[in-house]
Amino acid sequence: MRLRMMKGLILAIASMAPLGAMAGTYDLVIDEQIVNITGKDKKAMTINGQLPGPTLRFKEGEDVTINVTNRLDVDSSIHWHGLLLPYQMDGVPGISFDGIKPGETFSYQFPIKQSGTYWYHSHSGFQEQEGVFGSIVIEAEKREPFKVDREYVVMLSDWSDETGDQIFANLKAQSDYYNYSQQTVGDFFDDVKANGWSAALKDRLSWGSMRMMPTDIADVSGYTFLMNGKAPETNWTALFEKGERIRLRFINGSAMSYFDVRIPGLEMTVVQSDGNNVQPVTVDEFRIAVAETYDVIVRPREDKAFTIFAESVSRTGYARGTLAPREGMAAEVPELRDSLLLTMSDMSMASMGGMDHSSMAGMEGMDHSKMAGMADMKGMDHSKMAGMADMKGMDHSKMAGMADMKGMDHSKMAGMADMKGMDHSKMAGMAGMEAMDHSKMMMGSSSANSDYAPGSGLTPEAANGGKFLVYADLKAQTPFADYREPDREIELRLTGNMERYFWSINGIKYSDAEPVRLKMGERVRIKFVNDTMMMHPMHLHGMWMQLDKGNGRFSPLKHTVNVAPNTTLTVDVPVDALGEWAFHCHLMYHMAAGMFRKVIVEEAVVPAAAQ
Ligand SMILES: [Cu+2]
């Protein structure tokens, strides 16, 4: 392999130099080529001819030079996800540098100051989705606090035969474009049967007012999920001898997909997250958010095959591989579990006490033009529509108990204008839902279980009824030396409008936002308040976030944290890296739509009087 040879050569030269740290040079070439992942030939972006790109193996303490050549006909870039480095080397066009023009080479040079499992990816356009990503493994200077006999990178990703531009355009045009598990008119009538007209309508209209649908767990589906670049049928296989301890370095390099990971028949001991050692915790299953990494150790004691099963949280598919004593073996592949439906209880409607009921009056704003086409609802018993009069005096107290409702499909509500005999005046109050004060509806955001949406299908249960990893389980291996109360708090509300596919922070998209300014040496608490029904994997460049789950100085260091729907998550950031950094949701299309901020870290100015 050229990459290896080059490194060896440079190492040889470096070893002749009288002084200096170890230095490795790596060459990456970003190019386009035809791949066939789903049975169709498609153009992909590759690094050194591979998808994903090659695994970069660094040593802690090494000075690296990575020459990245762009052979695309558009600008490109590589960002080193989770690495602590000078900001000019961070690889975000428009923040760290200008990007890499077609035909040009950019030399990244920085010292390696950490160890663990990381990854790299393009920060330009949607190139990451199309193949410009790969893994980074950094060997620790000191001995690690666990022993393994072998190790494998398990890179998870989502592949689409469509380009990122096509997907984003589709989402912008119709946000539920990929929502295949969308509820149907039939589902609506099932709800009516089960819960009555007014309850079913209430639920659907409420969802509409939030511009969300109950199936909005993932906003892009239709992906083929890959393990180390291999589709499930191709069965990527990792070999072992029974009794060995095997380290699996899981990386979620997907553009949009979360996974629930398990290996039926084996317990997994989590020893690292986001490259940092954690106190070992043994689990049966864990969720990996987009851009997170988890290192687990497994120890198969039998001479048989085990399936590594990474089920997409959208439940539309899975990535799969095999741990086996010999090539060509396979174990049973589990069935996909039922898709998760959000319910109104996930929105903590119980806390709607503070809602401004006066705004419920009148439905002037209701847009009848959107109501095209319920003509196909033949057979509907119009006499039952009388029940809609109930909407007028909608009983909010009842809304707390909507947990069991299957949900609603706002788009399918379209067209009620065509329902002859429907008395629109009786619908009074429904348009008022639009004017509902959303901030008040989110009062449940401080709910106790902020790992996953409480009371919903999103509450995880290991497939075998065993242990599912939650964030509170992650405790740093060693206490953080400078652990103290934060100097100040910044609240970042994660906001969005699913219908128009706007994603933002504090209601403001990146292009309209002021940067977040931090001072060197300060400790800042960031309070993420997720005002949406989607999970957002929030990623800070250049500095660690200490995930606050009540573990104090053992709070783990993370580069990416998942903020569950309608929950609050706090992290403390020890501000220790000058410069300009990116801070964003790592769901590619949320980032592109504007859920992104620039962070500027400035030198703390010592007041003149104190000098
Ligand atoms: Cu997001």
Image (spheres, rainbow, N blue to C red):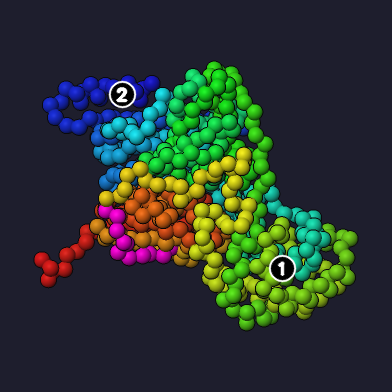
Query: Is 135 on the left-hand or right-hand side of 18?
Result: right
- Give the position of the C terminus as an image quadrant: bottom left
Determine the image quadrant of residue 492: bottom left
Residue in view at x 29 percent, y 44 percent? 85
Instruction: From the viewer's side, name the closer residue of 183 and 113.
Output: 113
Which of 56/371 is in front? 56
Labels 1 and 2: the sequence-earlier one: 2
Q: Residues at badges 1 and 2 in contact (C-beta under 8 Å)?
A: no
Residue drawn where x is 51% and y is 45% of the image = 469
* Disc 2 element: helix
Residue 71 point in image, percent of width and height: 41, 34
Between 443 and 7, the residue placed more toward the observer is 443
Q: Amino acid at mark 2?
A: Met
Q: Is residue 193 left or right of residue 429?
A: right
| Spatial separation of the CA atoms under disc 1 and disc 2 | 65 Å
Residue for point 28% across, 22% down: 8
Question: What range of the chain is rendered magenta?
Answer: 482-492
Q: Residue 64: which disc?
A: none
Label 2, on which residue? 6
Q: Which residue is mark 1?
A: 202
Q: Residue at the location (65% across, 78% down)?
A: 360
Q: Secondary structure at mark 1?
A: helix
- Going by the picture, which residue comes out furthest to the left? 611
